[in-house]
Amino acid sequence: MEMITLLAAPAEMEAGEVTVEGDAYRHLFRARRVPVGAIFRVVDGRGRARWGKVARVDRSSAKVTLGEPAPTHEPAWRLDLLVPTFRPERASWLVEKATELGVSAIRFLNSSRAPRHFGEANIERFGRLAAAAVEQCHRSLLPEITGPHDWREIGPLTSGIESRWFLDTRGVPGDWGDGDQFGARGALLVGPEGGWTPEERQEVLDAGWRPVGLGPRILRIESAALAGAAMLLLGRHS
């Protein structure tokens, strides 16, 4: 059978039995007709994974009993992505694809050229998209999605993170530094459409962020964010 990953509540993972209902039940046991006895991965969104076996399928729910640990499919190195607020439909696409790449957190920021506010409904939608992407790409950690944050919160949001980069048109393309010195976690800061203001750029430089370029072309926010994240996560820490 094709590999299946089911995202379950952490409490159910602890209890050793998962009840599958609603959309997940309809998808797995009505559309895909997963049978009793089938084995697949169950993850808790916090980085844990266990093998699950379908014990019972009823008219509107199913029971899955959990067994041994399963592969987590998570990168050994963690990356937080800080991006400006922009159009919700494009931000939705970014959330989905960044989750597939293995990003650990997505923080939306307001800046001088990105003062947009999403609203609670959009943040909730981003969470649903990330959950679906976790199951689709078979990872086990649901990235934390927060914001919009005030520009002044960059420091607290990245406190304790060893390696920090910001994408900059004046930065050297690919100049990420020595991968052996990255530590356990990194942060990538992406600028708004129209670029950084001189004050913002100087502020992140003064705070110790490393400027990195992506070449001579000007990329949209989501393109730049995913290109940078892919270089870091897949090129060095897959």
Image: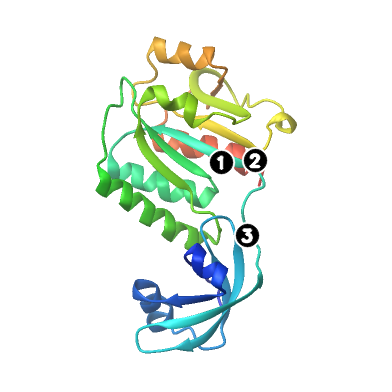
User: How far apart are the two marked residues, 3 and 1, measured between alpha carbons?
Assistant: 19 Å
Of labels 3 and 1, earlier in sequence is: 3
Which amino acid, mark 1?
Ala
Front residue of 167 and 103? 103
State if disc 1 and disc 3 touch (CB < 8 Å).
no
Which amino acid, mark 2?
Gly
Please tell me whether mark 3 or mark 2 is closer to you in this view.
3
> Which of the 4 image quadrants contains residue 41?
bottom right
Q: Is residue 85 left or right of residue 10?
A: left
State if disc 1 and disc 2 touch (CB < 8 Å).
yes
Residue 226 point in image, percent of width and height: 48, 40
Residue 197 point in image, percent of width and height: 37, 14
Task: Return the residue at label 1.
Answer: 230
Task: Return the residue at label 2.
Answer: 235
Task: Return the residue at label 3.
Answer: 72
Mark 3 residue crowding within 10 angstroms, few (<14) / some (14–19) / many (20+):
some
Please tell me whether mark 3 or mark 1 is closer to you in this view.
3
> Which of the 4 image quadrants contains residue 219?
top left
